[in-house]
Amino acid sequence: MAQEYEKIVKDALLSVAPDLEGEEIVPDETFRDQFEIDSIDFLNYVIGLSKATGLDIPEVDYSELESLQGAVAYLRRRKASMGF
Amino acid sequence: MTARTITYRDAVYEALREALRGDERVFLMGEDVGYYGGAYACSKGLIQEFGEERIRDTPLSESGFVGAGIGAALGGMRPIVEIMTVNFSLLALDQIVNNAATLRHMSGGQLSVPLVIRMATGAGRQLAAQHSHSLECWFAHVPGIKVVAPATIEDARGMLSTALADPDPVIIFEHATLYNEQGELPETDDYAKDIESARISRTGGDITLITYGGSLQKAMAAAEDLAKDGVDCEVIDLRSLRPVDDATIMASLAKTHRAVIVDEGWRSVGLAAEISARISEQAFFDLDGPVARVCSAEVPIPYPRHLEMAATPQPDKIAAAAREVLRR
Amino acid sequence: MSEFRMPSLGADMESGRLVEWLKSPGTEVERGDIIAVVDTQKGAIEIEVFEDGVLEEILAEPGEEIPVGRTLAYIRAPGEPAREQRAAEKPKPESEAETPHTPSTAKPTPSATAYPPRTPGVHMTPAARRLIAEHQVDPSTLKVGPDGVIGLSEVKAAIGAAPTPLEARPKSKARGIDPGEMRRAIAAAMMRANHEIPHYYVTLTIDMTRMMNWLAARNAERAIEDRLLYAAPLLRAVALSFAKFPDLNGTLENGAFVPADRVNIGMAIAVRGCGLITPAILDADRHDIDTLMTKLNDLVKRARGGGLRSSELSMGTATLTNLGDRTADGLMPIIFPPQVAIVGCGQISERPWVVEGEVVARQLMEITFAGDHRASDGRRGAQFLSHLASLLGKPEGL
Amino acid sequence: MSADNEVSLSRAEAMALLGQMILIRRFEEKCAELYSTQKIRGFLHLYIGEEANAVGVMRALSPNDAVVATYREHGHALARGLPPGEVMAEMYGKASGSSRGRGGSMHIFDKKHRFYGGNAIVGGGLPLAVGLALADKMQKLNRVTCCFFGEGAAAEGEFHESMNLAALWQLPVLFVCENNGYAMGTGLSRSESETSILQHAKSYRIAGEDVDGMDVVAVRAAALSAVGAIQNGGGPRFLENKTYRFRAHSMFDPDLYRQKQEIAQWKTRGPVVQFSKWVIETQLLSQSDIDGLEEEAARTIDEAVRYAEESPWEPEEDLERDVYTPRKVEETAR
């Protein structure tokens, strides 16, 4: 199941920054530190996650989605609370 | 608005007739303009209407009767002198350059020469070198005279009255191949046309074709040909060869960045060279390529048709030059 | 049987009107006889026949306008039997009669502008040089055309402007922009601007707390794709301020300030790995915040995808550069020539701030206004910032 | 053609005079036909009716004398001995024409025959003739330059300037004015205050005489005496040959300015008609001689047309050849 969430996060990120194709992502480091993602990119990334998972993600949760590890953990938690 | 289909020759005739009826001081003078009706039949019927006094056949004395025309203008008349073709004007160059163009300035502004000279010009009828010259640039070089080239029916009809109203000498060049051309002349009560500005005959954005007189239709044909492969030409009809309407030219260059000048005169020291120099002075930073010139080959125009065509600007050469400037 | 055709009677005669026949069918004719009269522009001309025989049949009627070369009548040679039945005669096409067997001029004409080859090396056209300067493109980064020339098409390809219909669409890279090229182009432009423009700087720290709370409340009621970033209201406030200060919104052209009649705000957008490009949002003062958000989003995508329009790149009247959150507090921006002003915003961060005499934590943003001293002075820049601050202070008013 | 003309004419001379006039007449008639079928283009000015002048004067000139003519110069070229085939090819514009096809009907040149061409500018040839004669005088070459022109030229400044120079410097030039009464569409009385062109010449102290331009024997006699006078250093001479063109000024001229009877009346005194009658009356020649000359002329002209038809066009690549003399002098291949 973790792989599935990881793919969703990577896909959302690539849709915003296609040039990151094939880049190594350090799981516990924020995307902004690794890849110069700015606020507009981040917003579109979050929108991508929301569309892919059907979850509505409030602004206050944004900070949890800033790294691969954090985002996967968040998705697993939200899905679990929905009885998946 | 109604319009009539008439020939270029009819337009010239109507302009002459209107001028003669409108002002007693106006009279027409030249070789065979009277009983013969004009070498190109532009004044046929005028002598029957206005009589020998105002439609004056002259002996073959170009220097003589052009000089006399200048004198009559000084004396208060408004002569229209017809030199059969620019080829014979060489015999009257002294009178035109040293008298007509110079008297006002040289007399400290006292004397005025309100004279109009009309001449046929250009090649295209296999008349060989001595009868096929295009020497408009010789006259456009001289300060003190205005030089115009009516390329359309409207201009052939409308330029004469403006020229006659001008206190200074005006030379009107009518390309010999245009007389038979037919076209629409919109009905109006005032046909007068300005004689100092150029006209955009075709708007376009990719390249500007600049030309005048007998070459206008060739440039338009080249533009149609180029349109087939997506090149959108702007065609400028200079109409006035002195003064030159720089503003219209430079505005077009600012848009298209590329220019081809079509001039039936010879390339060296010609009118196209003058226009090209003005463009490099005023629109240099707009240029995306050298200004091209399509002129007559540097040869006396030969008699055989295929050599005359080879020697003079043609639509295919204009299109080829445009493609070169467009780097395509 | 020989055909008698409308003769060419002059160098520019294309046709003639038959006035009358002077011989009737069946009568004898001799070489040199006048057979008919034709009217031309010059008047009526008698036309002669050039062989002996009998005028067999007349094809044209008086009054008809007949092109040169068309058959008018048949002449039966003496002693030739009369033809009972005559095949329908197709009139000979004029063109063939008009220019008998002159050689075709199909040979390729020598190049109309045949000049000796250019001096070797790369040649850049004047129009190309001007576009490069306007868009701060580094010339050394440009690709040279196959003919050794860098022209408008080459420059337009490099700055990603919509190519004019003429140029073949340039082979687009993944994102259409060569990062190395852009880096060098920006460096060259910045160097020139910094060197030539006498900058002055004024800074102001602005309390953005009310703005951020207002945004959070808005976003809470909105679906995720409609949520706003503070960049949108910030852009609107900056645009409205430039509208209020026309002497700061325009360009410097050969030493004289020319005020712009529109407010087009150039947005500094980072293109990963390449650096900054500043396409403008046109008439930014006339759009509401939601529209500006959509335009911003679209602009960022196109800037990175190489799809910017040349108008966007050349029509900016002033520029806004926003570092964004978790970056730095403040910056000293460089003006983009030929503009005369730029607004630089640092990150929004929580810092101590005095409100009604007490020190409290507030979300603060440091804004720096850089102006061209040839067009305005520090005092004017400071007035601009205080007006901007008042707008940002009342987000609901934007 | 006064009957008591005691000039004795050899049979050979009569054959030559009549033969050339007939050749020119038929050649010009053929040209009119070829023009109507567009084989000949541009302008075409025919010499029909004026043949006696070229034929008569040329008899008095020697091969190394020079001839300058006008755009109505086909007859002069043929009378001067230029090959009919080359003249016709030039009318077609073919590369084998007298001027490589570049000049056409109005510009026939042939250096071998010192035929310095037609000239389309009225009066344009006169100063050239004066110059050729000046060169002969300065190089002490006993040669004559003969300059043909129409009475229309007398209105041009170049006519008066040339007359004066020739007289002032006593140059060996024979001026032959072919006065056919009309300068293009304008009759002489409407273009000249003094309609006697000889009178103009006399005002420059140039000796000369009026000649009946329809009488080839009279023209020949006047030319012989004028050339003789020039050759023994008598300075320039002037002949005003009263003549008439039976055709319009050029092919595209409705000829409305001349009365039909006037034309008909002159035709009765046509040079060919008149001389033919005289040689028969004086039994110098027989009708079969005349028929023979007609057949020979017809053969020559058919041959000339065939030569012109089969001659090549000048290739476009040669367009700019001969604008300047080539650096290394190589014979420009005919």
Image: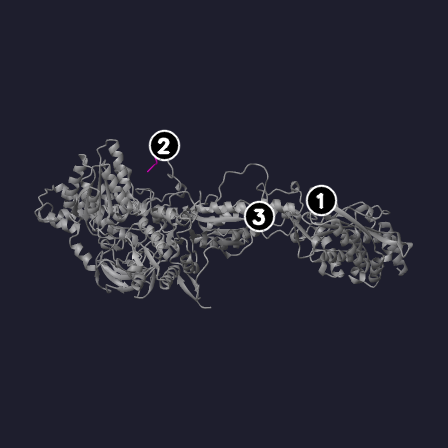
Q: How is the image coloured?
A: one colour
Q: Is residue D201 above or below residue C15?
A: above
Tell me where residue C133 sits by quadrant: top right
- How far, Cα to Cα, is label 2 from label 1? 70 Å
Residue closer to the observer: C327 or C101: C327
Q: Residue D76, image x and y in percent?
A: 23, 44
Question: In the drawing, does residue D127 fall left or right of residue B109?
Answer: left
Q: Is residue C107 above or below residue D258?
A: above
Q: Which chain letter matches label 3?
A: B
Name the residue beneath numbered marker 2: D329
Quarter of the picture containing the N terminus of chain C is bottom left
Residue closer to the observer: C353 or B220: C353
Name the residue beneath numbered marker 1: C198
Secondary structure of residue under mark 2: loop
Name the residue beneath numbered marker 3: B286
Say few, some or many: other residues with alpha carbon within 10 Å of mark 1 (under 14 / 14 to 19 / 20 or more).
Answer: some
Tell me where residue C147 sits by quadrant: top right
Q: Residue C203, image x and y in percent?
A: 79, 49
Q: Amino acid at mark 1?
A: Pro
Q: Is residue B65 above or below residue D206?
A: below
Residue C103 in view (yes/no): no
Q: Amino acid at mark 3?
A: Asp
Span highlighted in magenta in the image: D328-334
Contact (CB < 8 A) between labels 1 and 3? no
Whether residue D98 is in magenta: the answer is: no
Identity of the residue furthest to the bottom in this view = B1
Contact (CB < 8 A) between labels 2 and 1? no
